[in-house]
Amino acid sequence: MKECPQIIGKGEKMEDKLLIKIAMEAREKSYSPYSNYKVGAAVYTKSGKVFTGCNIESASFTPTICAERVAVSKCISEGYKDIEKIAVIGSEVKTSFPCGVCRQFMSEFGKDIKVICARSLDSYDVYTLEDLLPNSFGPEDLY
C-alpha cells in the first residue's frame, strides 16, 4: 500500500497522471511469460490510499489473474472498500481496458468508480465503471 498525496491546486488531471505513473511502476512487476503482455493497475481510495497490482499468468491459463483484480483484492483485503478510481495501463501502442471479468468484479464496489484507461501519461481516457459495464449484475439484483 502506498500513500498517494493529494495535489492541491493542480487539478484532477495531475492526480490521474500520478495514478497512471504508479500503475506504470506496478506494470514492471508483471509476471507474463506466456503473453508477454504486461499490465499494471493502481486503485485510489477515497481515504487517500493506493493499492497496486500487476497481471500474474499461469501456464494453465485459467488461474491467471488480471492486474485490476490483484489491486482491488489488495485494497479490499486491507479493509478499504471506498474505491474512487483505478488506473489501468498495458500496451503503449493501444489503450488498455479492463476485461469483462474485471469490470464485473469492480462493479461490486461501485458503479461510479472512475476507470482511467491509459497508454501513457499523456494519452488516456476516463470512464465510469457504469460507462464500461452498463446494466451490470450487482448486490442490488439479489433482492
Image: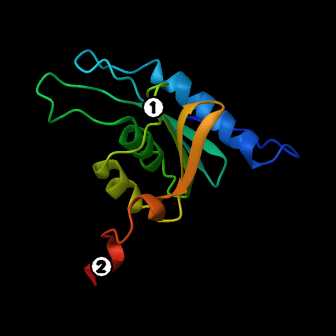
Residue type at tag 2:
Asp
Is residue 110 visible in the rendered structure shown here? no
Residue farthest along the left direction in this orientation: 60
Q: Find residue 23 and report its image quarter.
A: top right
State the residue at coordinates (46%, 65%). Answer: 130
Image x and y of residue 103, in percent: 37, 54
Residue type at tag 1:
Lys
Image x and y of residue 142, in percent: 26, 79
Q: On screen, 44 above or below 81?
A: above
Is residue 123 visible in the rendered structure shown here? yes
Q: Find residue 37 and report its image quarter.
A: top left
- In the picture, which quadrant includes the N terminus? top right
Image x and y of residue 57, in percent: 25, 25
State the residue at coordinates (35%, 78%). Answer: 140
Image x and y of residue 122, in percent: 66, 32
- Left or right: residue 141 compared with residue 10: left
Residue farthest along the top direction in this orientation: 33
